[in-house]
Amino acid sequence: MLPNRLRLIASMVKHGSVVADIGTDHAYLPVYLVKENICPRALACDIRPLPLEKGRQNISLNHLEDKIETRLSDGLNAISKGEADTFTIAGMGADVLIHILSSCDYIKSDRYTLIIQPMSRYYELITWLYQNGFVIENQKCTHEGNRRYTVIKARYTGQKNDFSEADTYIGAMDLEDSECREFLQGEIKKAERRAIGNPELKPTIEELKENLK
Ligand SMILES: C[S@@+](CC[C@H](N)C(=O)[O-])C[C@H]1O[C@@H](n2cnc3c(N)ncnc32)[C@H](O)[C@@H]1O
């Protein structure tokens, strides 16, 4: 069974896309995408040989060696332009995600879809996306036990609009959706704890609470 977090990412992948899964580890996501006929083929990439080997074993267990290629790659460095049209990048903190995205120039094109699942400080990732000309086309949330996750689908347009700090917490979440509401409520609680040593966060917190009313 695929965890909810990876299942949500899979549900946001357009049918027929060629996905490169960056930081694939066990390759659960590309295996699911190909097995479910969402993707005709995929690339499973990781910076470290051992996780990549785990991925290779899972791919071979599912007899998908002809459809899923494994590749040792720091971010998108070993993937050429056009080899994939969609990049899934999941299970990493905002700093690693921003490092990966800022190390690749060619993703600044509207032909690529990014589907990103940050494990921490998602609002910093959204800040980076907005500052660098990306729009968020869709953003969804899910949970697994007590842990809540958000998944961000973004694309480069080159447009840079003004945004507030609250905008980076809300992103493109549908605040009528219960998963998104609960995700944001959790983030507001975390922000309230940070505001103890950082009172300038307080107006943003108030704005977020207003949005949830
Ligand atoms: C916690 S696992 C996440 C696995 C899977 N994506 C998921 O969400 O379940 C993070 C993986 O990212 C890989 N990773 C970390 N930095 C990376 C980078 N710069 N480029 C590619 N992979 C990276 C790690 O080796 C590790 O296998």
Image: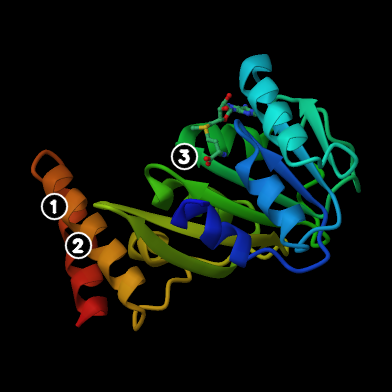
Of the two numbered discs 1 and 2 on the same chain, state the one appearing first in sequence: 1
Between 129 and 131, the residue placed more toward the observer is 129
The numbered mark at residue 211 is none
Task: Identify the image quadrant of residue 26.
Answer: top right
Q: Which residue occupies 77% across, 33% down?
A: 60
Residue corresponding to mark 2: 205
Q: Which residue occupies 50% across, 67% down?
A: 139
Q: Position of residue 128 (x, y in %)?
A: 53, 48
Q: Nearer the viewer, mark 3 or mark 2?
A: 3
Q: Which quarter of the rendering shows the C terminus? A: bottom left
Q: Determine the CA span between mark 1 and mark 2.
A: 7 Å
Of the two numbered discs 1 and 3 on the same chain, state the one appearing first in sequence: 3
Labels 1 & 2 near each other (Cβ < 8 A): yes
Q: Amino acid at mark 2?
A: Ile
Q: Which residue occupies 80% across, 40% down?
A: 63
Left or right of 146: which side holds 75?
right
Between 145 and 170, the residue placed more toward the observer is 145
Residue corresponding to mark 3: 94
Q: Residues within 10 Å of mark 1 (few under 14, many from 20)?
A: some
Residue corresponding to mark 1: 192
Q: Position of residue 185 (x, y in %)?
A: 22, 64
Q: Residues within 10 Å of mark 3 (few under 14, many from 20)?
A: many
Left or right of 140: which side holds 116?
right
Q: Amino acid at mark 1?
A: Glu
